[in-house]
Amino acid sequence: MESPPRTSAESAPILPVFRFGLQESLWLLLVLTTPLFVNFWVEQQFEASKVWLLRTLIWLSLLVWLREWLTGSQRRPLTPAIRVSAIRRWAVALGLVLLLSTLLSTNPSIAFFGTLDRAGGLLTQISYLLLFACVATRIDVPTSRQLVQVAVLTAFPICLLALAQAAGWQPFPVITDARSPLTTTLGRANFTGAYLALLLPLTLAAAQSAQSRPQRGVYAALLLLELAVIGLTQARAAWIAGAAGLAVLLWLQAAPRWSRSVRWLTGLAGLLTGIGGLLFVLQRGIASGGSIAARWTIWQASLRLLWPRLWLGYGADTLDLHFPAVYPPQLVYYQGRGVAVDRAHNWLLDWSLSYGVVATLLLSGLIFLVLRQGWQQWANSGQPHENYWLAGALAASCAQLVGNLFLFEVAATGLLFWLLLAIVAAAPAPSVPRPLPSLPPLSPARPLWLRAVGMSAGVALLLGAVWQGNLRPLLADVHSWQGTQAMGRGDATTALAAYRAASAGQPGRAAYWVALGLTAAQLGEFAEAEAALKQASALRPTDPVPYTQLAALYGRWANTAPERLPQAYAAYERAIALAPTIGLSFQQYADLALRVGDSASALRLAQRAVDLDATDGTAFGILGWAEMEAGHLAAAQTAFVQAVKWQPNSADYHLGLAIAHFQQDNFDEARQALQRSLLLDPTYEPALTEQLQQALRAQ
């Protein structure tokens, strides 16, 4: 007996079938590789590696676009808004303001290329704009649907890897300082949560528009996986973004059936509810003293930086150069000691500080125009079930905007956000089938000489840009990774050669000079170490960290060359002048002063350090020894009590407490502190502990 023929829905494949040309294949690679790519043979395994690859693919896409324009190949008709220049003018104006901001930046090199770990400079931001232009003027509806499906399916490997890491299995040799083990392929748990939060509305829309039960089952399972992993990340920004995206999607799906007044009322009610929810989360977060409190503190300090360069900002990726000047001391209690602040964790503040208020307004206007256009197409489509992907793109874009009120853009979320904006902008134009080779082009080909000159210039610019912007940083980071691996093996000589190669390949990267300087100092090559750290300080003249590292070098060098001690003091003074409210600089300065016998300076500096950070056990220990040398026994005892409170495993501070008790005739307390010190380290200061033991036995 023959089986009945299956319907199209029943025979639909579980996974999408792709029919892409060259341009579309590049977009597909972008969607796949940006969230999933990790390079284990460089120092910057996650973010910077993704950005280098992302920029290369976008620039290739731009070259393909240029070829199509020169040869008159058929392109889809522009949407009405783009054709009348409504969106195009905003995008061009935004690009020009970004360029002007970079030229007038406080550090144009960093603003152009970005920092080593973020790579979020002008090159990256302009690449996003170019991607938006290429996709918005080229993509059709079937390709839009397929790219959205591909983006959704990238969640599968990410979620499975996150679950494995949550269970304690780390299959990859990652280099990260993240506290959570859920690094996945994004580098951090909060980045993982942010990316999956963008995919939530896209996944739900894909499940609702699936043509068969197996497809719906796959997307439903993926949706549950995404929700589970977002919960495991403990990233509140991702929770907020996911909730906002799903709420917007559900409203979009219901709104076309309502009257205009009901749409306005429900939309306004949802907006007010969302604002109220955000304020509630903010209030509770500030009260609990967690990550939300840290963000609130960063926002307040960032506002102090904003006014002096309100219109054009400081330049991209330069916040960590200027934030130390306004560093709020209480921030150390929320995010720990020695943590640099390189983002404001709020996209409005980040854009204003990086590019200025003008660029922020232009970006906001561009996003508003695109989302309004997408809403109009969705509301008037008449076939909402077939356009669920458009509603998902609109909701995911809103989720990104809401989530980044508490976070910042990374490569995976930035790529997906700008791609979705382009898809939404292109949605109103009808789908145009790809032409057969025999059909004439819609636009005439440019003259042969123009095609030759244009393509030659395009290829030359592409090769130069890829080499200078992506390949040279990649090769230098390979050398840096080799240096780190050599240091891990204890081979400082090989590491020094690797860091020399890294700094020679990218002489504008301060991090490589710092690594070179610290390694040279370890080998006793103080002259080379000094030159390297001075170069790092010159590249980041407003950053206190290279100056403290230079001061530490001079302090060590002073053991054999006492004339270097004033240079150490001068370097620490410079660091303190740049960051007068960071307690760690005062602590390190006080430690040097105590070691060279300058107890008066050590006392003053250590007191300032504990005033700025009342949880710094090391600073309290230094203060205790300085107070003891000054003869202030009660004050020394108080300082050592605080030192062992915050660093209970320090034999040094327990010994200091024992001596302070002994000299005040508190013999029982002295015995207890001494016993604790010997228990922690039986070999610590044997002459001093033996002398104290004999004195206690005499009592």
Image (cartoon, rainbow, N blue to C red):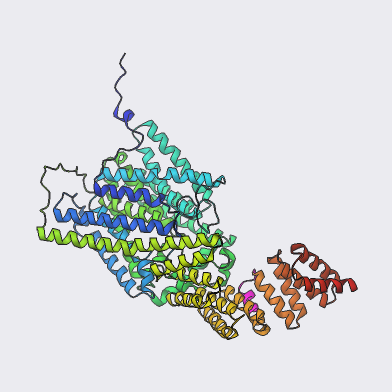
Which residue occupies 86% across, 72% down? 694
465 vs 430, nearest the viewer: 465
Span highlighted in magenta in the image: 605-615
Give the image location of residue 285, x and y in percent: 55, 59
417, above or below 480, in the image: above
Where on the picture, by quarter, is residue 590? Answer: bottom right
Give the image location of residue 110, x and y in percent: 39, 70
Which residue occupies 44% across, 62% down? 479
660, above or below 81, in the image: below
233 vs 667, nearest the viewer: 667
Is residue 250 shown to the viewer in this render? no
Which residue occupies 24% across, 45% down? 21
Left or right of 587? Residue 222 is: left
In this view, the residue farthest toward the right is 698
124 vs 90, nearest the viewer: 124
Give the image location of residue 540, x and y in percent: 44, 74
For the N terminus, the image quarter is: top left
Is residue 294 shown to the viewer in this render? yes
Left or right of 183? Residue 21 is: left
Does the magenta segment cover residue 517? no
461, above or below 142, in the image: below
Q: How many marks?
A: 0
Main SS of residues in magenta: helix
Does the magenta segment cover residue 613? yes
For the C terminus, the image quarter is: bottom right
Give the image location of residue 492, x and y in percent: 53, 66
